[in-house]
Amino acid sequence: GENVEQHPSTLSVQEGDSAVIKCTYSDSASNYFPWYKQELGKRPQLIIDIRSNVGEKKDQRIAVTLNKTAKHFSLHITETQPEDSAVYFCAASPLNGQNFVFGPGTRLSVLP
Amino acid sequence: DTAVSQTPKYLVTQMGNDKSIKCEQNLGHDTMYWYKQDSKKFLKIMFSYNNKELIINETVPNRFSPKSPDKAHLNLHINSLELGDSAVYFCASSQATYGYTFGSGTRLTVV
């Protein structure tokens, strides 16, 4: 089955700097890769996703890149702000939007 | 209106008890899920349910059983609760090629 690894497990950056979180997956059949943000005590919420036919997607300060050959994808957050502090999860889906396998999460702290 | 709602939000119970957590979605999604998030924040799938097809994660003890009276509901029943069952349980739903929508979670504490 699918296995998703995520690095780093914790990340601290200064406000205004960029943050990058990387994930690798094992199942070459996976074709949908969402990223979720979970603030303390709240539910995970989708922030951006990418499909296997696209190499990069951007939405304001966040972007995701996908390398299908190497089976890895990354989340990039630019101009970080304190409200970006949260746990971020990547996921891979071998069933085109269903039965996600999540990475173990990255705790991002943006220091003022 | 809340898209995916779970009840209760908090549940404290003694070892050995049987409890249920309810989940309802009003998004018209075809698939519903239960995830367990432990103290280390790992999100692990327990069940997915799509058009009466139940897919079970083989690591889930058979004390856990999902019940779906209709497409909009997927409840979780837990028998003979153990200390290790303490966690946050998230219900979620999805439709085709779109991402999940999670419920607000149920924090289960077994004492």
Image: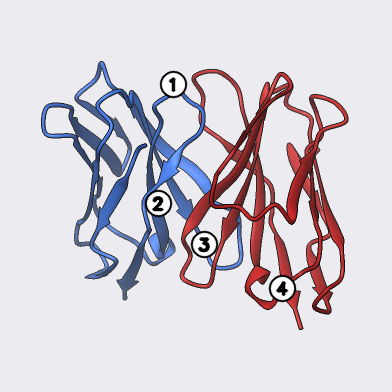
Chain colours: A blue, B red
Task: Please tell me which residue lies in front, A27 or B25.
Answer: A27
Question: Residue A5: x, y in percent?
Answer: 27, 51
Q: Name the element at disc 2.
A: strand
Say if B25 sits above or below A54 in the image.
below
Residue kind at label 4, given as amino acid type: Glu
Q: Is residue A80 above or below residue B33?
A: below
Q: Which residue is mark 3?
A: A39
In the rendered image, which residue does mark 4 sit on?
B82
Q: Please check whether the numbered discs 4 and 3 fall on a single chain.
A: no
Q: Quadrant of residue A40?
A: bottom right
Farthest residue toward the bottom? B111
Label 3 lies in what chain?
A
Residue B10 as seen in the image, left or right of residue A8: right
Query: Secondary structure beneath disc 1?
Result: loop
The span from disc 3 to disc 2 (Cα, nearest Å) is: 11 Å
The subunit letter for the residue under badge 1 reads A
> Dot 2 falls on which chain?
A
Question: Residue at horizontal 38%, vertical 32%?
Answer: A49
